Image: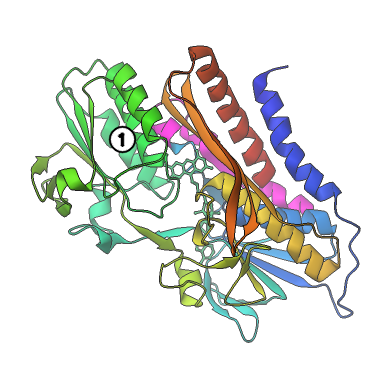
Amino acid sequence: MSIISTSRRQFLGGAGALAAASTLPCPLFAQGKPKVVVIGGGPGGATAAKYIAKDSAGAIEVTLVEPTKQFVTCFHSNLYLGGFRNFQSITHSYGALGKYGVKLAHTTAAAIDKDKKTVRLANGTTLPYDRLVIAPGIDIKFDSVPGYSEAAAEVMPHAWKPGPQTQLLKKQLDALKDGALIVMVAPPNPYRCPPGPYERVSMMAHVLKAKGHKKSKIVILDPKETFSKQALFMEGWQKHYPGMIEWQDSKMHGGVKNVDAKTKTVKTDLAEYKAQLVNVIPAQMAGKVARDAGLANQTGFCPINPDNMKSTMDANIYVVGDACIPGDMPKSAFSANSQAKVAAMMVRGELAKSATFPARYTNTCWSLIETDDTVKVGGTYAAKDGKIAAVETFVSKTGETPELRKQTQQENMGWYSGITADIFA
Ligand SMILES: Cc1cc2nc3c(=O)[nH]c(=O)nc-3n(C[C@H](O)[C@H](O)[C@H](O)COP(=O)(O)OP(=O)(O)OC[C@H]3O[C@@H](n4cnc5c(N)ncnc54)[C@H](O)[C@@H]3O)c2cc1C
């Protein structure tokens, strides 16, 4: 039995256990079925739509609103950047959700009317709902980095939303000649995928090293003073890419003052970098549709009740995934999927009277540093003191054996197969 199949089974086991724990649905609504609208077909929304429809066995009408017909995952997009995956392998279709009874509306949700309990779609349709699950992910705060804009992102990609941005970054990386300078402007907290920028840098270094670069450099300008799995990344960079990667915290560079797409120049308080590739990852906020509906607070993200993932702003709305304020959980696909299963259980409890259980959440984030050298961080979580709080956490250790790191990479690949099947198949 391979580790890949084991971890995939373990992953799916969690979902199955939750599904099996529910009782048969018993509709409360005399006239027609209760209706759920889900906005956003990422790990948060697609998981919620699938599990509400599947586990209510037709008792709840579920419509998933998502403009794209194929979902490209941000998770493992760094592996695509590093040449460990092709683009097709991180692209998924929604076709299988139909077999659970999920109706797909391939358009954008334009506005939510919380009083009337309706969602207006960009194609002109209005969908009524009994419960709304909203999972629009993040929007990029372009103006959080002076000089950056949507237009500048066509030259200096953020690649923090999937698809063309990721492909642009890879094209630019693959075209670099030895002696190139890459500058990454890292994001401030809170942002999606805390270890993501540092895994990305590792994958960029892997590509440069594999192409025999001796003089190319990567400078990370970070607004933070520490970052996720820092000791593990630093150890890995020293081991695999000595002298190639320079990380500067905010005290070292004094702040990013300007980025210029025309000249690919980044100015900090203390220096000016003329780069061949600039990857700007700005600050982030909940997707527009959630903010416009008044579901976000002053942080730009949406507060939720940790017992059930309900918005604290509206009792008929659940917010899952990167758009919510997840307490101690990181913003990750694993977290979004875990939160969505809690929301799905609670929605079925409300609309189909199925049994509910105290919310439990899990997450693990793996990061590939170099071929077969992968580290992880994760934990289990529960509602405590008004937030999703860590119950137990774990993190890889420095100095682990190559065998253990290789096994961790096999887990990582198994997790990806498992979670994408859990969301889309
Ligand atoms: C480089 C990188 C690496 C990562 N690596 C990992 C990893 O290894 N492991 C991990 O767990 N996570 C990882 N992540 C994080 C992960 O991708 C996100 O946390 C996850 O995608 C969040 O899921 P979500 O459903 O909340 O949002 P999203 O995945 O962003 O999905 C939101 C969906 O909502 C849709 N939408 C938005 N607005 C509307 C609207 N108005 N109407 C209809 N639809 C709308 C969008 O089209 C989109 O499809 C990584 C992220 C990045 C950037």
Is residue 213 found left or right of 65 in the rendered image? left
Is residue 214 found left or right of 123 in the rendered image? left
Q: Residue at x 25, y 19 (%)?
A: 242
132 is higher (above) or lower (below) than 9? below
Say whether residue 43 is visible. Answer: no
Q: How many marks?
A: 1
Is residue 230 found left or right of 84 in the rendered image? left
Predominant secondary structure, magenta span: helix
Q: Residue at x 37, y 53 (%)?
A: 189
Say whether residue 394 is visible. Answer: yes
Looking at the figure, which quarter contains the C terminus?
Answer: top right
Which one is in front, 360 or 50?
360
| Residue range highlighted in magenta | 78-100
89 is higher (above) or lower (below) than 73? above
Residue 178 drawn at (x, y percent): 17, 22
128 in magenta: no
Badge 1: how crowded within 10 Å, few (<14), some, or many (20+)?
A: few
Which one is in front, 324 or 413?
324
Residue type (three-letter) at the residue carrying disc 1: Lys
Residue indicated by mark 1: 171
79 in magenta: yes
Q: Residue furthest left?
A: 271
